[in-house]
Amino acid sequence: MERLPGFRDFYPEPLPQAEPWSADARQYIFKKWRAAAELSGFREYDGPPLEPLELFTTKSGTEIVGQLYNFTDKGDRQISLRPEMTPTLARMVASRERSYKKPIKWFAIPQLFRYERQQRGRLREHFQFNADIVGEADAAADSELIALLINSLRSFGLTEADFVIRLSSRNAWHDFFVSRGGLPDAEYEFYQIIDKLEREEPAKTAEKLQKIGFDLPSVQEFIDRGEPTVELAGVMGDLQARGLGAYAKIDYQVIRGLAYYTGIVFEAFDRKGEFRAIAGGGRYNNLIKLISAGKVDLPALGFGMGDVVLLELLKARALLPAFGQNLGAFCIIESEDLRLDSLSLVQSLRESGISTEYTLVPAKSDKQFKRAQELGATHTLRLVRKDGGSLEVRIKNLATREETTCEPAAAPCILRAALA
Amino acid sequence: MERLPGFRDFYPEPLPQAEPWSADARQYIFKKWRAAAELSGFREYDGPPLEPLELFTTKSGTEIVGQLYNFTDKGDRQISLRPEMTPTLARMVASRERSYKKPIKWFAIPQLFRYERQQRGRLREHFQFNADIVGEADAAADSELIALLINSLRSFGLTEADFVIRLSSRNAWHDFFVSRGGLPDAEYEFYQIIDKLEREEPAKTAEKLQKIGFDLPSVQEFIDRGEPTVELAGVMGDLQARGLGAYAKIDYQVIRGLAYYTGIVFEAFDRKGEFRAIAGGGRYNNLIKLISAGKVDLPALGFGMGDVVLLELLKARALLPAFGQNLGAFCIIESEDLRLDSLSLVQSLRESGISTEYTLVPAKSDKQFKRAQELGATHTLRLVRKDGGSLEVRIKNLATREETTCEPAAAPCILRAALA
């Protein structure tokens, strides 16, 4: 039986096939994301992987449904697997915002889903690191959030030579749009055109711009000048003070297609331009009000970073460690009359925090030794009965081949010291 | 907008409402499960939360569909959110078993789903710790798996006074059934009757037993005697050797309703009998062959432990720690001309592994100090400009009120030492 198309299985390493993902790689990435968030004072939250379809159409309009993994449940409810985390965050914050002091700094690591009929072979799920700040309108919050994005990428060993945050601002584009006589009805379309600028034929872009009263050269000139707004200058100054200035630059080509952004927006890209965006985010000051039908009105901003592009980038830059079983000890049972005493030893090792394996059924010593090596054990332990009848443990360091002998009760302590 | 009925939101603590779950409690439980599994040499895996409906009906028959969270997707596929992990494990193992040495010892922490129309207010999802051993028919594997179950519960601080593993055996019941002249067609029904024994009226049970040629007194006598099979005696001996004998007992009342078990079965219960089963599992030697349509034939066994009952039990036994933000440092910014230097200090603290917060916008010192206390910071740091113009850091231990002064560059090192 096969798994569903577009979904991934996560196997333990070493992997038989050269997929960029595995259970180990996933856990490695989750740990780094979590650690970076916690260092910056962000708290974890999560919601259900399923939400009422309406939560997503309220935010993005009904045209989003074509991309959603939506269905009708047994109670005739319109349901969708979550395509993004922000609406759930907005719902959760709106329902309990009085219980939390502002600013709220939260993160989550949700699995997200989409279902576009036409695109075969494309993944229908991925995991995403989401971090958001709610309740602070000042751009100081934007800086703090972008600093987390940079620090989380740095925690994987990525440097300013590997990635850059392209900073832009809806406000800057709004001012440009209004100052050149743009009409309110055409503003969202204008943003869509800018969003496609890098991927579309210039002639086509020029034609589209002309239809709403703009021209490509002046748009291009605005981008090339890259004059920072007061807000963006503040963010750059903040990041520079943190020693992170080299990780960000003003780039008005970034605008983010989504209708709901209201201020600073940004995307993280690899410097070589080999991959899709690593992460993206920005301000969405109106969303919580929208989702809560006007009951709660709080400014907010956030970013999302997917696991798939990140894994590809880390793999390409040789920044993924070699994953495998990190076994502390393998207990070799040389004869079956020592099995019960060996089980006692295994339990005492595990209780003292040492990951320990042994063979479940009788096997020759050399086979057990080979198994210990396969599992990456750093030490083997063997119980031996001395002439007087009492037991001793022989501990062997598999790297140095050194052997130590001790009483069974002392083995966990000695091994812990050796592993420290 | 509301979340779907039967689903949970996971908020950060401290919680405004007295729910037994939170994002912090969930992460605490996941960490303990993961640590226990890794100490015993189990490796992590995961599959998609959605599978073809057929995967579950192949295992459990079409009558299971009434309990599943199933639906039709946009591609007209029959889909189900996973109600349990074992079929996914069987699918994954069957498709790649040649790449992994036996025994395969794997664990997962999936979110599982069900949808029964009639039961309102009941949760439709929970998380489950799943551990399985594949490829070893000897009961030594059963002992190793049960030892993991015991050790994982002990890692939460639960003792032999809190819980017990009730051990039973399908083989023992099979022998009983056959030796008393039971007919093969009635065997599964017989197991269902035994499974309901504790919850059903004795008269009703007696009547049902009679219909298939059995009587309640002889069944009760078999249970009361609790004569261990050779296999079960071996498992008890193994657990005793590990010092875990007091955590398990033979109890033939446990039989597990699911049709697919083939050997030793077990359930973990709180000693006071206040809660539903904490965990349950057993051998299912035929499942991988069934799921792989005969291509792969490997003996297997496993258990599942849900998060909901465990959380209730830990809460009742006062074994859940007080969760909250574990902040290392709060940087107080006393005047805005020190903001950029303070941001540099914040970054250096975070880079050295100290979880650090500060106020995003100007605020009075006493308000910042109050915020530091609310966030549970152990220390505050304040930059102060000395007469000569250079900067120094005042580090205050919020518990002892002691204050230390140092140069900004030395602050991370001094604070790390204080936190160690």
Image: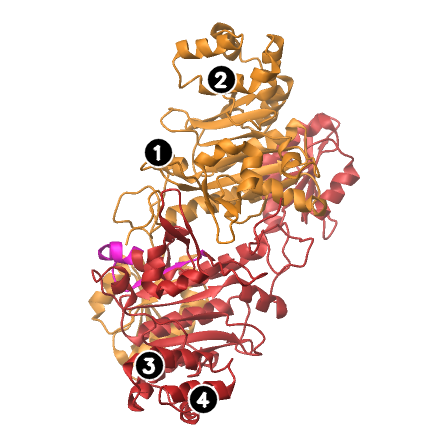
Chain colours: A orange, B red
> Between marks 2 and 1, how big is the CA–CA gap?
25 Å
Q: Amino acid at mark 1?
A: Gln
Q: Which residue is mark 4?
A: B206
- Mark 4 falls within which chain? B
Q: Which residue is mark 1?
A: A118
Q: Which residue is mark 3?
A: B186
* Local crowd size for mark 4, using a 10 Å CA cut-off: few (<14), some (14–19), many (≥20): some
Instruction: Give SS at disc 1.
Output: loop
Does the segment drawn in magenta span residue B106?
yes
x and y, in percent, of residue A320 in the image: 36, 41
Q: Amino acid at mark 3?
A: Ala
> Between marks 1 and 4, how big is the CA–CA gap?
59 Å
x and y, in percent, of residue A357 in the image: 34, 65
2 or 1: tag closer to the N-terminus:
1
Residues marked 2 and 1, same chain:
yes
> Between marks 2 and 3, how big is the CA–CA gap?
71 Å
Tell whether label 3 touches label 1 (CB within 8 Å).
Answer: no
Q: Which residue is mark 2?
A: A194
| Residue A403: mark | none
Please report the residue visible at 54 percent of the width from the left and 66 percent of the height from the top: B310
Q: Quadrant of the N terminus of chain A?
A: bottom left
